[in-house]
Amino acid sequence: MARLLPSTVLYQVMRCVHDALQRATRQLQVAGIPEARREAELLLAACLKRDRAWLLAHPEWPLHEREVRRFERWLARRAKREPLAYITHQRWFYGIPLYVARGALIPGPETEQLVELFCVTLRRTPQGVWWMQARAAAASRLPVC
């Protein structure tokens, strides 16, 4: 198991986005996490409240010590195979970002395929078309937070 370094050492090692991604990728690879680079980018993006494209466009962006500490905690959790959605509390589903609490079932690609199949089936019946239109109209009236 990887030993956590004191925060001052971590801050010196991870001074910017590029350094943090390099170190995180190595740490996740050692832990055997598939797609380590992608996972590191997603974790850091969530930690900084930015998107992955922003990370790639700003590799020199300096990190604050508190961001490094949070990122290191999240990395340690991911290295122990905790699902990314539980760490970041977010999972995209059918084009919608969902809040994911610990213990919640995390929707996967198969669930999106089931929703698509359900929608295709509904479109084949007059009642289904009416139901989908009514749901879309109701959803359009929901307040946006």
Image (spheres, grey):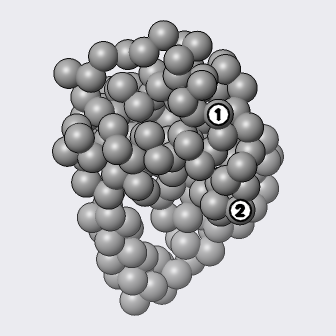
Q: Is residue 105 above or below residue 132?
A: above
Observer able to see residue 90: no
Give the mark count.
2
Q: Residue furthest top?
A: 6
Which residue is at a point 47% across and 25% down the rendered structure image? 72
Q: Residues within 10 Å of mark 1 (few under 14, many from 20)?
A: some
Residue 140, horizontal then vertical, whole percent? 75, 61
Q: Which residue is mark 1?
A: 15
Q: Pointer 2: what residue?
A: 57
Left or right, residue 140 beside residue 128: right
- At mark 1, the secondary structure is loop
Report whether 27 appears left or right of 128: left
Q: Indicate the amino acid at tag 1.
A: Arg
Foreground residue, 75 or 103? 75
Query: Is the Cβ of the residue at disc 1 closer than 8 Å to that at disc 2?
Result: no
Across and down, in percent, residue 28 comes to 31, 42
Q: Is residue 65 left or right of residue 81?
A: right
Q: Nearer the viewer, residue 71 or 81?
A: 71
The answer to whether 73 is drawn above or below residue 106 in the figure is above
